[in-house]
Amino acid sequence: MKYSGKPRKKRTQRDYNLGFKLALVSEVEKGNYTYKQIQKVYGIQGRSTVLVWLRKYGTLDWSKPNFHTMPKSKETPAQKIKRLEGELEDEKLRNLLLNTMIDVSDERFGTSIRKKLLSQPVQIIRQDKQITLSRSCRLLGISRQAVYQSIKRKETRAYVLSQIKPLVLSIRREMPRIGTRKLYYLLKEDFNKLQIKIGRDALFAYLKSEHLLVKPKKNYTKTTNSKHWLRKHPNLLKELIPERPEHVFVSDITYVKSRERTHYLSLVTDAFSRKIVGYKLSDDISAENVVKAFKMAIKNRINNQELIHHSDRGLQYCSAIYQKALTKNNVQSSMTDGYDCYQNALAERINGILKQEFLIYKCNNGKELNQLIKESIETYNNKRPHLNLNMKTPNFIHNKKPEKLTSLV
């Protein structure tokens, strides 16, 4: 990647989080890039930086280079000539059909295809020196000036759009699956500085052309055991809407896999600000580990006002150790009715954001996964804009003064 006229910024390993490294390892192992190509695309310094990541986090053997040779053709010269003659006849027929279709479309529907797609035929014409530009324009019924103007417009637009890709990749380094709407919001100021005129829909089209759109992932696995004899608490959120930070905490448990084993992630989220205030990664789903996420959330509180804790009717949340922790901190317990997961939709949504946007690549073990989760939650809380928060970050809303929150959310 070339940065003309600007001093090159020196980066270290600390500038790349674990999620970004795993994303690049996955792209190389899928065959989308070589490790040298992806270093050039993302402007990564060092001759073998990505190769080191492949050896450390990858699933393939990168200890020895793998040389690929092209298979030799088994066609005889006569067979090759016959095949090429057939392809040439097919191409002539295809051109005749396409030209007829264009003429019919322009005549009946007024599409003006020949005038709108000037630069592409010209590039083909220039490759064949036997056909002059003047003759081609005469056959198509257009002027040479129109061709040159079209080429110039396309080249100017291509140069302007080429400045967008480095900006997108710099954000995707920390948030590899952030959506286009949020990207547009984050890059608006940079677009104005660089005088790039582009709307949200045009940004969608550009990212699609560069294969940078994010495809949504859907998965659901039930981890809640509600069929037990322990006491369940009523749902207090049926008629209640959170009005301030630390009014309602919502909790849930989800599973995350590494190559070593299946782990369990307990999350506690503030329902008003959407900030993840507590988390715990463990190798089992015991109440002793789940309650540690709640204790982290209590330790990080910024006020002592009334607080409600809402969760599903899972065994861990109904257990004596968890309910004792709630009582000790003067927190009122609230639970869903029956097996309706939509009554704890916010907690489920936060699980989905982490797993679909950040925890998308497998780590080797629990230690690496814990580091990835820590980095992901830090990025989610402080850098990722939230649609329901008027494109503000959860941490911004969580720490904002109460009198200014009404106009923001």
Image (cartoon, rainbow, N blue to C red):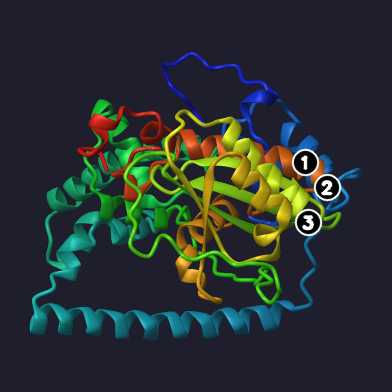
Task: Report the amino acid beneath label 1.
Answer: Glu
- Residue on which the image places disc 2: 365
N-terminal-most mark, 3 or 2: 3
- Residue on which the image places disc 3: 286
Q: Secondary structure at mark 1?
A: helix
Q: Are marks 3 and 2 in contact (CB under 8 Å)?
A: no
Instruction: Give residue 202's mark.
Output: none
Q: Residue at x 39, y 41 (%)?
A: 385
Answer few, some or many: residues within 10 Å of disc 1's Cα (few below 14, many 20 plus, some between 14 and 19). Answer: some
Where's residue 170, x and y in %?
A: 49, 34
Answer few, some or many: residues within 10 Å of disc 2's Cα (few below 14, many 20 plus, some between 14 and 19). Answer: some
Q: In the image, 138: left or right of 384? A: left
Query: Where's the C terminus, which quadrant?
Result: top left
Distance of mark 3 from mark 1, alpha carbons? 22 Å
User: In terms of depth relative to the viewer, which is nearer, 64 or 124?
Assistant: 64
Q: Secondary structure at mark 2?
A: loop
Q: Secondary structure at mark 3?
A: loop
- Residue on which the image places disc 1: 368
User: In terms of depth relative to the viewer, which is nearer, 269 or 9?
Assistant: 269
N-terminal-most mark, 3 or 1: 3
Where's residue 257, x and y in %?
A: 75, 58
Foreground tag (3 vs 2) = 3
